[in-house]
Image: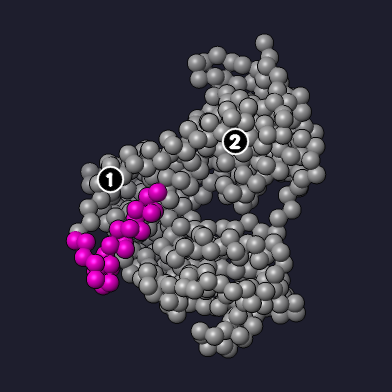
Amino acid sequence: METTYDVLVLGGGPGGYPCAIRAGQLGLSVACIEEEEVGGVCVNWGCIPSKALIANAHFVEKSKHIADAGIAVGNVNVDVDKMQDWKGGIVKKMTGGVRSLLKTNKATLIEGRGRVVDKRTLEVKLKDGTTQRLAAKKAIVIATGSATIQVPGFEFDGERVIGAREAVSLRKIPKRLLVIGGGVIGLELGMVYQTFGAQLTVVELTDSLLPGVDPECVKVVEKKIAARGGTILRGAKAERCEKTANGVTVSVSSSEGQKQIECDMVLVAVGMKPRGKGIGLEEIGVTVDARGFVPTNERCETNVPGIYAIGDVSGVPMLAHKATKEGEVCAEVIAGKPAAKDWVTVPGIIFTDPEIATVGITEGVAKERGIAVKVGKFPFSALGRALSIQETDGFVKFVTEVKTGRVLGIHICGPNASDLISEAALALEVAATAEDVALTIHPHPTLGEAMMEAAAHSIGHAIHIVNR
């Protein structure tokens, strides 16, 4: 027996559930199929829970220095069990909110594992073990997201060798934490537990942490890790590990030879892989590349009519906010609206300490492309608001085209970079020039003034820093 809807959305993460909600708003009958919990990786063990822990770590770090401002707080105790219960409450509230929004917008949530049978049919294995067939009149949307990559020899056991999923739910802080992978996930979570007292070692295969990020931003974060007693091994490979009575021994090789590193826990954080394979797409002719991505056009359409893909599974950048926008676009396309993916930039945020946020291209990429650029930079150490909150590490950097003055990239490392970057994204979307931003009055005293000052610096008009 089949149940028929206009649209079937396979996956209830940050791409899938907004797609289902928007489809419902547009008058389409829609079912969202999710095998675990709505909200996907982002809400359940990614963006939201990790940022809850990061916020707590930030408070702990701040408490160590607030005495300089005349406030004595004494020793701050981290109650890990209570913190995890609090974090779990946030997740529960978020998932409950998603469920309510789906229901309010007349989108049906079906809990089970779905598989594509043909371009109009899904088969869902429900949680009770039974199977249900669903038919789509208009479209099937693939929103299956991504999963953590495992490294051979470092298989997750949930205790000594873990991935990001386990790392946000630890109820004991490891004394010695080794992180394999110096990317976003590894540094965010590694720095959390370093702040809580863990001795941190980061093993990165490439010559730099956070590949692709502005090198000057990376240096600020590297300096902070080192200042807290952490060790960073670049150009190094974690070969294998051996579990011992006292923890884990990791063999690491580099140009300097091989060394054995003793630790209590290993966090494998080498990235995420798309979940495009093994769900029936190849059998019906949908293109799935070697990595598991499902290629799409600007209308979220795959090569098979009626099959769409959004979010992580459809390609990089693998970011929740990009998935959400694609979900909305996809629903509008299916409903016959003149929608498409036409954004100029997708902001990227890294919740290290300090935060890094970026839009557009770096100075290095511009030079590789033969574009003559000017660079303006304003340090938070020269900003009154940053001084008043004791967060002066980092800067705002503008990369502008010499010929037109147009802003090509903005890179922020410092306090509240994750909030400041929205103005930067808008600057690129409206093709603003550095002069446009510099002439826009920014309120004082705020962190946002650094945007105005950096823009002015790039055209030689800065007031609170020496112009070059």
Residue 30: name its quadrant.
top right
> What quarter of the picture does the N terminus occupy?
top right
Residue at 68%, 16% (x, y): give it: 3
Q: Position of residue 286 (x, y in %)?
A: 74, 35
Q: Position of residue 117 (x, y in %)?
A: 69, 23
User: Quick one: label 2 or label 1, which is nearer the N terminus?
Assistant: 2
Q: Main secondary structure of the magenta part?
A: helix
> Label 2 belongs to which residue?
17
The answer to whether the residues at label 2 and label 1 have Cβ atoms under 8 Å apart is no
Residue at 59%, 15% (x, y): give it: 131
The amino acid sitting under disc 1 is: Val
Q: Is residue 333 visible?
A: yes
Query: Does dot 1 land on a helix, a strand or a loop?
Result: helix
The amino acid sitting under disc 2 is: Tyr
Query: Does dot 2 land on a helix, a strand or a loop?
Result: helix
Left or right, residue 66 beside residue 46 = left
Q: Position of residue 181 (x, y in %)?
A: 46, 55
Residue that lies at the very extreme toward the left in this rendered image: 74
Left or right, residue 406 beside residue 169 = right
Q: Indicate which label's residue lies in the foreground, 2 or 1.
A: 2
Residue that lies at the very extreme toward the top in this rendered image: 1
Crowding at mark 2 (Cα within 10 Å: few <14, some 14-19, many 20+): many
- Residue 70 falls inside the magenta stretch: yes
**Eyeballing the image, is 173 above or below 36?**
below
Q: Is residue 239 visible?
A: no
Residue at 42%, 48% (x, y): give it: 50
Q: State how far apart marks 2 and 1 are (Cα).
A: 31 Å
> Label 1 belongs to which residue?
80
Crowding at mark 1 (Cα within 10 Å: few <14, some 14-19, many 20+): some
Q: Which residues are magenta?
A: 52-74
Residue at 41%, 41% (x, y): give it: 90
Q: Position of residue 425 (x, y in %)?
A: 63, 62
